[in-house]
Amino acid sequence: MNDEQDQDKKSGVSRRGFLGATAVAGAAGAGLASGLLGFGAGEAQARARNSGLEFHVAPGELDTYYGFWSGGQSGEIRILGIPSQRELMRIPVFNHESATGWGKTNESKRVLNGSPHTNGDTHHVHLSYENGTYDGRYAFVNDKLNTRVARIRLDIMKPDRITEIPNVAAIHGINPQRWPSTEYLFCSGEMIIPLPNDGRHLDEPEHYWTLMTALDAETMDVKWQVWVDGNMDNLVTDYSGKYVGATCYNSGRGVTLAEMMGPERDWAVFFNVPAIEKAVAEGDFTTIGDSPVPVVDGRGAAEGGTAYTLYVPVPRSPHGLNSSPDKKYVIASGKLSPTVTIMEWSKVDDWFAGKLNDPRDTVLAEPEVGLGPLHTTFDGRGNAYTSVFLDSQVVKWNIDDALRAARGEQVNYIRQKLDIHYQIGHIMASMAETVEADGKWLVALNKFSKDRFIPVGPLRPENEQLIDISGEEMKLVHDGPAFPEPHDVVMVRADLVRPARVWSRDDPFFAETAERARQDGVDLERDNTVIRDGNKVRVYMTSLAPNFGLTEFSVKQGDEVTVTVTNLDRIEDVAHGFALVNHGVNMEISPQQTASITFAANKPGVHWYYCSWFCHALHMEMSGRMLVESA
Ligand code: CUK
Ligand code: CUA
């Protein structure tokens, strides 16, 4: 008997048998949970006791969760499979990207609205909801750098809308409405700026403000904004569809570090969405500068708030704000204070109904968790997990016990402190931002990797650590290096995401390109032709492995050339590329997709184009020539 068999015999569970069972369950879309249920209860318990969840995903097996990772200052989103932590795909969003041509193709330029920016800073990814869980339609992500938000279609895994937010600087927190479904996307403007920011003010703090913004999640148009006191940091929605909260630091509205550290207390600010909608409907708003967006005045922290806002004083510089999956609590993580502040959504409701005297009456407890609490996540079993930056720990604590301790009972609410490597920022458990939080996996997104990987120069990867939280005890199971620098992630049960296998020919993503072809009298799936329109030349061709429909075409020096390629391949995974030598032109054309790219033909001579995605044994030969006749 070898070691593994011996081990299997002792634990009473065959590792191979277990892997087989999860593979079957995964194929049925049921995930790991059902895999466990497939055993006798005794066996499953023995497993949980002995070795926790299986995190090794063997060759040929599939992950049970999609992880949607922000990409920080890379400006992108990344998709990782969980639990393997294999990077499955990158979704360029605000950045321009070499392989796919994002930022170069006409279809991506339309989504980017002709923005001059080629970079971004994504911090928070969240998915659209129905009844408090993911509906699999969209992901949303912020761009702190250039004050934008983007929506990503989860069928094609490409952004389809990007909106620049007026009147604010640096969008940081975002959260979609969770209940009954995502009609709004809310986002917090972080940095205070003079309003209007028209070059008249530098040193007059009374002019510096920021706003909370609500977008229509369907159109991605800005619906309204709310003027607040302080800078806003992270933002969260509740599970009733009525309230939005944000952490607010710099309540003194300082512009230097010393000034920002001034006041002892900052706030969690809560927004009453129906009251704000009513104000907008009744014309009780202003506009700022030349932006037409209605701005409702929610300033009034000194009085505890307004009809639209509630300011709950919390220890200085709160950071994360998270809604518990039982729909009850909203928890602010203290950052500079070793505490987290547990507030209750129903008490926020009581405040706006006039039933409370003091904003602090919404606070149930302020348990100490460790030094530098940043974000909190949940397992759906009543436990919270807070990332503690300075202590480099994940702190597991029990919410009910923390409330009992606050009422004076002698209970220890801390369940476990697990060292991580090193300096954790965000933390997220599987499905934790939904009512279906399932307490299986947790990822610690650590800002420093130090000695955990072989050195790769002065710039190091971050270290994202996978932790099994299915049992009583947290178990660290894997280190995962990450290119700088994801901030946040959501881990989504694989059955909730339903990506397209090939493009649909009537996809709106390239509808404008298809309409242009129709006006040119071109059938994209048949015609290989060149249309001249003054000095604009439109080249239409098909691709079918290993051939382009056109192997040569001629244009004149000074022409503006648009090449439109329609990939006729229907076989999954057979993508082609159109790459034109010495012109900075390259793009992806996936099965059944139409893609187009425009460039200037300024260099007389013959220029080769080739297929840039490996598609066939004769991929290298899939090429053609463009002749530029000299003027
Ligand atoms: S923030 Cu980065 S660690 Cu932008 Cu969500 Cu907290
Ligand atoms: Cu087509 Cu490579």
Image (spheres, rainbow, N blue to C red):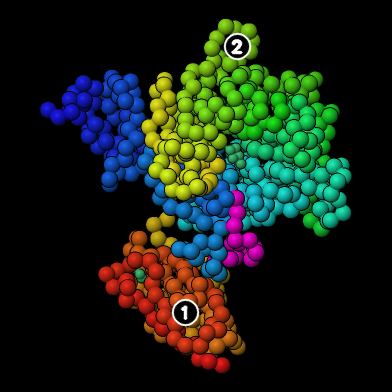
Name the main secondary structure of what is drawn in magenta. loop
Q: Are marks 1 and 2 in contact (CB under 8 Å)?
A: no
Taking the image as shown, residue 567 lies to the left or right of residue 403, namely left
Taking the image as shown, residue 277 lies to the left or right of residue 582, namely right
Of the numbered discs in the image, which one, if any, rests on residue 405?
Answer: 2
Kind of residue indicated by mark 1: Tyr
Of the numbered discs in the image, which one, if any, rests on residue 540?
Answer: 1
Q: Which span is picked out in magenta? A: 107-121
* Residue 311: percent from left, percent from top: 76, 30
* Residue 536: percent from left, percent from top: 58, 84
Residue at the farthest bottom position = 631
Taking the image as shown, residue 285 lies to the left or right of residue 445, namely right
Front in this rendered view, residue 47 or 372: 372
Quadrant hosting ligand 2? bottom left
* Residue 510: percent from left, percent from top: 52, 67
| Helix, strand or loop for disc 1 | strand
